[in-house]
Each structure stands twice: as C-alpha cells, then as structure tokens.
Image: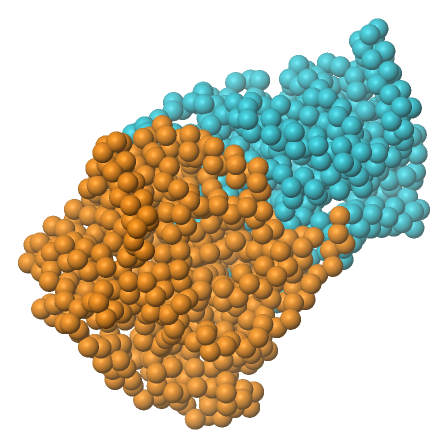
Chain colours: A cyan, B orange
C-alpha cells in the first residue's frame, strides 16, 4: 500500500490560441458549421472527427423533416453584437478592486461583458444576434487566487454590488442572464484562472481541484497521472468544476463514476459571511446539518465555489464502444429497463428514437466511395430486407464500456444477451464511437441552423420507468398539436432519447426545433412551446430537470413540484445566509433582499 | 416490462408480546446476559443463535484482559429507575392534545417518559441505573397519522412547547437527552405507530414508508414481496426509517445497497412552517437548492420526518458468509485496501483486530464435546503450528456476500485471491455467519457488564486509507497512556475494527471499556477518556463521526472540523427555519431562539 503522499501537479500552461472560444456562438473559434462550395453542409476546422467533411444528406433531410424550404442562400444575417448597455460601475468599488486586482483582471469591454451575461439557451443566443439581451454585467473580474475571491466578496459587500460567478458559460437555464431591474453594479466573477489541480492523492483516490478548472483540462491534468474524475457532461470541453457543482451536473458516464453529487467529497465556498470550509474530507460522515450539500444546485445564489475535493478513479484499462439496432423505440426501451435491473450497465448507454436515428444518418459524411459505400448499402439491405427492420421505426442504442478487461467483457456479454431478447442487432463499435463523438461536434449546429431560420434547443427530464414511454409520447404529441394549432410553418422537429438509466427510472432528453422564417420573435414562440412541453412533462410524472437546473428559465414551475413550505424554506435560507443578496444571480426566484 | 402498478401492503399487526422491549437495558425483554448455575456467562432466552448457551471462556478472559478481579458474585446492583422528575405540562396544551389524540396516545407514566429521554450512551445507561438522568420529557405523544403529527406541531407552536421526535431510541450521541435548562413542556413524539409501508412499486423499485417503521418490520414487510431496502445498521431490530435519516445512518451492507443518503429518494417532513414535501420522487434531478437533503443528520432539530420514498432491491438470489484469517491486522488492512480498489467488495466486509478476535473466541459457547471440540483443537493446531499464525497477533475478516449467483461467485473469487496475496487463510462460512449474528446478541452485553463494574462503549470514525492504521495505533496508545496516567484500575480494553470500506478510506469502530470498581462517577471518567480519544482521532485525520452523529455528545468538536462560517450558517439556518426552537432537541448546539 502506498504511503498516501500526494502529487502536486504543475500549473497548467496558459491557454494557447487553439483554445480560443467564440463569443457569439458555441465552442472553439476554430470550428463552425458552414456551406461548402458544393452547397453541402460542412464542419470547418480539424478538431473533430467530422471536421472538414461534407454532409451532403443533411440539408435535404432537414427540408423533408421540417417540411420547409430551408435554403442555403437565404441567410438570416446575425447582427452580433446587438446593443450592449454601457457599464455602470460605482467608482469607489472600482478603485477598491484596483487595490488587489491588476488591470488584466478587470474587464469592461462590451463583447466580453455580453458573453458573461448569458449561457446557451435558444433565447439568449437569438437575442445576442437578432434582438437584444438586455442588462449584462458591468464588469468582469478574473480572480487568480482564493484570497482575491475573498477580497472581491468583501468589496462587493462593502459597496453593495451584485456578484455572479461564471464558469464555462454553458448553462441552458438563463442562469447568467441579468435581471433588468438590477440597479447595482453587476460583477461577473470569471473563475477560469483558478484552474489548478492542487493535489492528487492516488492512495486515497482523491484530488483537490480549483473551481474554475475546465473539464477538458481536468481530464488531461489527471490523465497524466493515470487517473480520471470520470465526469463528462456534454459540455465537458468548456464547463468547470464549480459550474458542475452549482448546477448539480450529470456526466454521461455516471453509471461507472456517479453524478457530480456522488463525486464531490468536499467543497469550499466564499460566502457573504466568510469561507465555508472543512478541515478534512472524509470518506463518509455524519456530522449533523451538512451545509456543503446546499451548494449542489445553488446556481450562484449562495456564494462562489472556490475549490472541491473529488473522487478519482484509475484510467480504465479498456474503453470500448458498441451499438445495437432495435426494431422500434419500445423494444430498445425494454432492453434498457432489463439492462438496468439485471446487469451492471456500461459506463454510458443511450437510446435514440427513430427521428434521431435518422438525424444521425443524415449527418454521415459523403462516403469515400467504392467499397465503403457498398458496405453501407449491403448493411442497409441486410437490416431492412433480411432482418425486416422498418427504416421509419428502427432505433439505435449506443454504448461506452469502461473498466477492467474482465468488467468490460462481462458487461458486453450481459448487454448483448439482453439486447437479443428484445430483437436487438449488434451494429458495431464504429457506430457507437461515432454516436459519442457526435456529441461534441453537433453542439455547434444550433448556431449554424439559426442563420438559416431554424431555431432549436434541447430540454430534459427524469422520470420513472413506468411513466417514461407515455411521457415521450405525450410531449411529442402536445408539441405537434400546439405547433399546428398556432398555424406555424411546416412541421416541428421533436425527438427524444434516453441518456441515462437508473434503477428507478431514466433521463430523457428532447430536441425540439422548427423553421422560423416569417415568425415574429421566434425565440418567444419557442419559449412558450418549451413551457408547454414542460407542463406536459410534469403532468406525465417527469421532473423539472434532470441536470440542467432551474436558473431563470423554470422557477415558475417550482410551485408545481414542491410544497409552499419547501419554497418558503428556500427563501428563508437565502435571506438568512445572504441578506444583502450579494450573490444576485437571481436564479430560482432567489433575488431576495 | 410490468405496468408500474403499486402494491399497497396491509398494515402490520400490532406488536405482539414477543416484541416487548426492555426499558432499562438494550433490546427485547426476552433476552439478557446472565450468570448460569455453573457460574458461567449465559444468554437467556431463545431469540438468537447464542441464546441459552453457556460461554465458559468469557469471564476468565475478561479478567485477564482487564487485569481485574471481575467477580460474578459481586454485583453493582442497579437502582433503576432512579429519580424521575414529575411532568410539567401546560394544561392548555394538554387540553388541546386531547382534542385530536385518544388517551392511549398520550402518556405521562414515569418510566416511559424516562425511556424517551435517552438513547444508549454509556453515560445515559449508567445514569438511569446508578445516578440520575436529569430532565426528561414531560409527555410522550403517539401520533398515528400524518395529520396528527401536523396537529401536534401546530399545538406545539401555539403553546410554545418543545417537540423531540423519537424513533427507536437507539442513538449513542445523547441526541434524546433533554437540556436541564429547558423550561417549556417537553413532548417526546414517538413515531412508531406511523409504521406503514404505504406502497411498493416493483417496476420502478421504490417504496414509500412511514418514518416510524422499525427496521426489522421494514425488512419483513418488503421481503413478503421479494424486495429489500438493504439498509441494516447494527440497530436494525429497533431503529426506524426516520431515525436513520435524522442520524444519517450507515448500513452494514452499504457496499451493495448504499448508505441512507443513497437510498432515500424523497422525504416528507412536518416543520414549524408546514409540510416540507414534493409531488414526485425522481430518479435524479437538478431543481435548485434541495432542502430535503438537510434532513440527513438533522437529528430532530428541523422537524419531524413523517415518511420517505426509498429505493428497493430484489432479495438477493444468494446470501453467503465467509471469513479469512490473517497473520496480523496490517495484513488484513492491506487486503481490505486492495479489495476496495481492485474488486467489487461484497455487501459487507469487516476486519477485527487481534483483541477483538480473541473477544470473539471468548464468546464461543461450551463445545458440545467430542468431535466438535477435537475439530476446533485440530484447527487451532493447523493455524498456529502449520501456518505459523501467532495467537496474539492474528486477526479475522468476516464477509457477507449478496447478489446473483454469478455476482457472488465473482466476488468470492476476487476476495479470496486478494486475501491469499496478503497471507490470508480461508476460515469458513460458519465463522463468518457467527461474526455477523454476534452483532445483534452482543449488543446486550454492555448492560450486563455494567452490573459487574465494567463500563464500555463504542465510538467510530471515518478516515482515509493512508491515515487509518496510524489512527488506530494513536487512539489505542493514547487511551492506554491516559488510563495509566490516571492510576485507574487494571488495564483498559481498547480494540478496533474496520467496518466499512470506501475507495477513499474506511470506517473504524472502537470499543473501549474498563473495570470501574472503586472509581467514582465512572461514567464521567469514561466520557473524559472518550473525548480524549476523539481528540486523538481528529489529530490523526479522522472524522467526527462516520454514522453515529453529533447529538449532544460531540458538538464541542464542531469548531475543529468546520470553519466559523459553516457553524454560523448552521445557526442561521436553524434560526430562520425554526425561530421558536419548536424542535428543541438541542443537538449540534442548535437550541437557539
């Protein structure tokens, strides 16, 4: 047994130019969807597997699905950045900041302030391009040490400003949006320079990491020492440890590693009344009211998370992908159910519905011709003619196995055995890998489509097994009905996938989009329809959110899921712990003072 | 896939006479340790495997270990019940209670009030027999419905009384002890008539259970339908679901089923401002500040837990016991470490030190002679002569495997393979089973020994792997030194066992006892030494408690483990959510108004 001595890794290098992020759209600046010289959709850049490849099937498929005449030459030209309000900064506050922050740590430039005032909801992204976001932070501060965070909090209290912690800016709950009625100076506290892995303890499989560390850096930094945190939300390239805790995040590999609340052993927070912290991180304990747990889902309203001690795991001996085709969604769903009950599910297992399956096919790059194309045609023949799968019904399940060789072998045996029982057909590891890699590149498509009058977003829920299928059906039907009832153009795109299994239920992820040409304020139409979908979700026994959170997008639904006492407790808690509303993000209707 | 319809089990039958519990000592009235006609220790009754059996080796062994002349004819005669204060009940409050509770639901009888005023710390148990407990509840209320709990809370608020929820009364943290300075009427709210399993949902593997349901009844009630909650703290015969949540309990089989915080999906609470409750229990969710999580470890200070929705599991296909002998504690510890890292640990795995191993041998019943005795001697010969294990060093690890046949087979292969690497020797399933069954009968021994001038108790901690061995050594050494320094009689009994493994560390359970004849107020001497042990635990990197909690026994240590801000947050929270201190148990120093 090793002696418990810890590794103190070097500070990560300053981010290079390849890491530059776009201000006006999702992701890295080196990547975006485009229309090629041939009139096909293409992903520019070299970062992802799909990068540089033409996707000739995509536009025709979109036109068909939306029953709309999407035209690559008809561009809804963005006007980013639309109006950015002038910063309003209390001079005395600024002077005080200058006593402990360098000029490079204080930013008032417009586009940067704008970027710090939103996440990635469709409404926010539409607003920064076509309308107006409204109130944005007046100043962005970049603390580099925990002591500077403390001083920021003290200065904020003294000068009565509003502090809003900022991680990766990837939320989809309007969590960073500023209330128009906020009269105080709004300071976005960008935590990304607090990005150290402070120590790694491989004897006890723990690491202490600063809250501003970004997921991809945490993965790289830990992998150097043969370990991983295993937390991989779809935003892992950009989101931060502090953000994960504040939104109560879920990682795609939670079956193996757990969700964020399972991974965090301790968290330190700069609060309005000082540092919330502990002397030791225990494997497990019973020490009375554990207020650290309040930080999960706190969404910036109780303080600034500065660091956390998390569990780590050895890098898996084996990582393998897999995929299975099923005749219909119901078959795949029953397979998922049996898998969750009878076996140790693989690190990740996802099931898409038929429309999303088609979506995946439509994103297949132009084949390199010859054999590859033949193979694909032969496969298609086999699936549809020999196996009798119907192209308009069949669905796919994609899988990531991680673990020791023996674990993975066992999981594979169990999974394919159960899949067979439900008519599943193994579809190879390539298709599985592709499904997971799409996660990262597909995130760029939303902003691209917006330029072509298509507005889309995802929303999710968790629900018991027995309510899940009906919920999917109800939400799809309701959205289609409401869309038609409003006389909106073409057909909406509504699709669902099961992204997580639990013994008690599943996480369901919906994608909803439509062609908005001719619709005034489509972002508002979208929001209205999304709220209707949420109403249907709640009526069908689903939760308000599996992992996105509440933010300023969903607080109106809180009274539907909890008693008045529970709401009152939240408000009392906030008022008692932050009476000035120093942490004024205002999420969950907690902008109380 | 089943349709998700739920089972509504019948109400459990009223407890029969066999379920009567003792008021003055631990456990069922039908069981107690005694001295037999032959002068041997014996367990009376028929309930447990050891019941009715003479333990001839026990007294000689105790005399040797304590270096004291423990004499079965020298009894420290208990004077239970010592003084019980007269009840002080505000007449208007009593009148109001009588409007919604029957006479059978209101109790003022002395011994019952006394019983509701304590748990099972050595100090409490010594006090009720030999000195005085002090302030006890003035009235015990037995609500039978959630509505009655609500009315109790309302009446309590109106008449400014103190309400203390009562589950099984098994805590070891002075959590039920009443503060002497409490001037209000103290009402113990005995929850055990709210004992229904409200529904069982086998499709989604959840059950809704009232908070007063006792562990053994939950097990029986669920087992009828082929399921289990899997939560088995050592007190499972008596403790309740509500008590588990309030103390943040840990079950011995947590490797398979999780600790209480992993098992509870939802909890309903009667609070000073109404019912804290939710509409749906989600598999997992992110809905902002989750105040239900505050109930874990709340120790009666925030409200009365009325029911919870918990995860359930199929009854295991296979349950098997096992045991392994190791040359020394360090070997067994390294085995535990490798097991936690390399394999899926079995439902439960425990490692005792040499003294506790000897303790187990001393509790072996008189052999039935002949072959059995020979076998034991032959075994001993093999272990010590052939294998070379030293009787004064060797230790034992006991194991419970649960799961499917395949899971158990895999776990057994892994476990014995790893054990061999550390010099472990398989010692059979009988020894394993015996170890676990001892858990329940051994709990009765403390009260018995107290009659013979021996005072003893357990206390526990959690600690990282790398600090664990040193912590064990430090605590033992410190207690022995301090004992000697005080010139106390004979030798103290200090022993440790590892009762839980986590990837990041372990739970360590200490037993400490001594011969107290001639010591004035031995309960106070004990407390002083226990505090010293806790000081040493904290210095050695251990936690304040793994699962016992804080109560009124350990709040003085809270400033050593958390920042002033964390303490302040607790106080502010309590004050804000229960400004009258209606829930006046006063644990964790939270008797604030």
Q: Position of residue A371 (x, y in %)?
A: 82, 7
**Near-viewer residue (B37 or A225):** B37
**Near-viewer residue (A535 or B336):** B336
Residue at the top extreme of this rendering:
A370
Query: Which quarter of the figure is the N terminus of chain A placed in?
Result: top left
Residue placed at 72% from the left, 27% from the top? A323
Q: How many marks?
A: 0
Residue placed at 63% from the left, 47% from the top? A503
Whether residue A405 can be seen here: yes
Residue A198 picture quarter:
top left
Q: Is residue B264 left or right of residue A58?
A: left
Residue placed at 54% from the left, 86% from the top? B101
Q: Position of residue B110 (x, y in %)?
A: 35, 86
Q: Is residue B470 left or right of residue A379?
A: left
Q: Is residue A292 left or right of residue B8?
A: left
Q: Position of residue B27 (x, y in %)?
A: 38, 69
Residue B151 drawn above or below residue B320: below
Q: Position of residue A160 (x, y in %)?
A: 46, 52
**Near-viewer residue (B519 or A166):** B519
Residue A263 drawn above or below residue B279: above
Q: Is residue B180 left or right of residue B5?
A: left
Residue B89 drawn above or below residue A96: below
Residue B388 picture quarter:
top left
Whether residue B468 can be seen here: no
Residue placed at 22% from the left, 56% from the top? B57
């Amino acid at each position: 047994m090793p002696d418990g001595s810890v590794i103190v890794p070097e500070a990560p290098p300053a981010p290079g130019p390849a890491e530059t992020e776009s201000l006006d759209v999702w992701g890295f600046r080196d990547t975006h969807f485009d229309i090629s010289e041939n009139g096909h959709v293409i992903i520019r850049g070299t970062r992802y597997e799909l990068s540089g490849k033409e996707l000739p099937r995509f536009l025709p498929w979109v036109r068909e699905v939306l029953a709309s005449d999407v035209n690559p030459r008809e561009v809804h030209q963005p006007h980013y950045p639309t109006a950015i309000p002038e910063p309003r900064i209390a001079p005395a506050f600024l002077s005080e900041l200058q006593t402990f922050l360098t000029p490079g740590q204080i930013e008032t430039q417009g586009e940067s302030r704008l970027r710090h005032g939103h996440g990635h909801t469709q409404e926010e992204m539409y607003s920064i391009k076509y309308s107006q976001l409204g109130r944005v932070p007046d100043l962005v501060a970049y603390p580099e040490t925990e002591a500077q965070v403390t001083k920021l909090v003290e200065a904020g209290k003294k000068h009565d400003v509003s502090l809003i912690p900022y991680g990766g800016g990837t939320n989809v709950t309007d969590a960073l949006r500023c209330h128009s009625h906020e009269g105080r100076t709004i300071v976005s506290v960008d935590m990304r320079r607090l990005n150290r892995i402070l120590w790694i303890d491989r004897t006890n499989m723990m690491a202490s990491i600063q809250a501003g560390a970004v997921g991809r850096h945490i993965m790289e930094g830990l992998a150097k020492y043969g370990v991983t945190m295993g937390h991989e939300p779809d935003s892992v390239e950009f989101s931060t440890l502090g953000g994960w805790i504040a939104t109560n995040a879920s990682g795609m590999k939670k079956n193996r590693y757990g969700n964020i609340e399972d991974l965090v052993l301790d968290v330190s927070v700069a609060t309005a009344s000082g540092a919330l912290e502990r002397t030791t991180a225990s494997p497990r304990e019973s020490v009375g009211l554990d207020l650290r747990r309040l930080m999960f889902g706190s969404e910036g309203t109780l303080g600034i998370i500065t660091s956390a001690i998390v569990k780590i795991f050895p890098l898996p001996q084996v990582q393998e992908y897999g995929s299975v085709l099923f005749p219909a969604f119901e078959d795949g769903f029953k397979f998922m159910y049996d898998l969750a009950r009878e076996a140790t599910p693989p690190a990740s297992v996802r099931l898409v519905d038929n429309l999303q399956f088609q979506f995946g096919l439509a994103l297949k790059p132009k084949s390199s011709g010859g054999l590859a194309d033949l193979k694909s045609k032969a496969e298609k023949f086999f699936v549809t003619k020999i196996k009798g799968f119907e192209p308009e019904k069949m669905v796919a399940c994609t899988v990531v196995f991680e673990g020791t060789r023996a674990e993975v072998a066992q999981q594979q045996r169990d999974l394919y055995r159960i899949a067979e029982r439900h008519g599943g057909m193994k579809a190879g590891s390539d298709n599985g890998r592709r499904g997971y890699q799409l996660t990262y590149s597909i995130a760029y498509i939303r902003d691209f489509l917006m330029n072509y009058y298509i507005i889309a977003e995802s929303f999710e829920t968790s629900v018991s097994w027995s309510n899940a299928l009906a919920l999917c059906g109800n939400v799809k039907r309701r959205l289609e009905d409401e869309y038609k009832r409003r006389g909106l153009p073409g057909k909406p795109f509504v699709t669902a996938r099961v992204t997580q299994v639990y013994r008690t239920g599943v996480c369901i992820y919906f994608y909803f989009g439509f062609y908005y040409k001719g619709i005034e304020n489509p972002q508002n139409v979208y929001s209205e329809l999304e709220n209707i979908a949420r109403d249907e979700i709640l009526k069908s026994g689903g939760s308000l959110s599996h992992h996105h959170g509440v933010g300023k997008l969903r607080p109106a639904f809180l009274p539907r899921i909890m008693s008045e006492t529970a709401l009152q407790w939240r408000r009392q808690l906030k008022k008692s712990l932050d009476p000035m509303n120093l942490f004024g993000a205002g999420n969950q209707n907690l902008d109380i003072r």
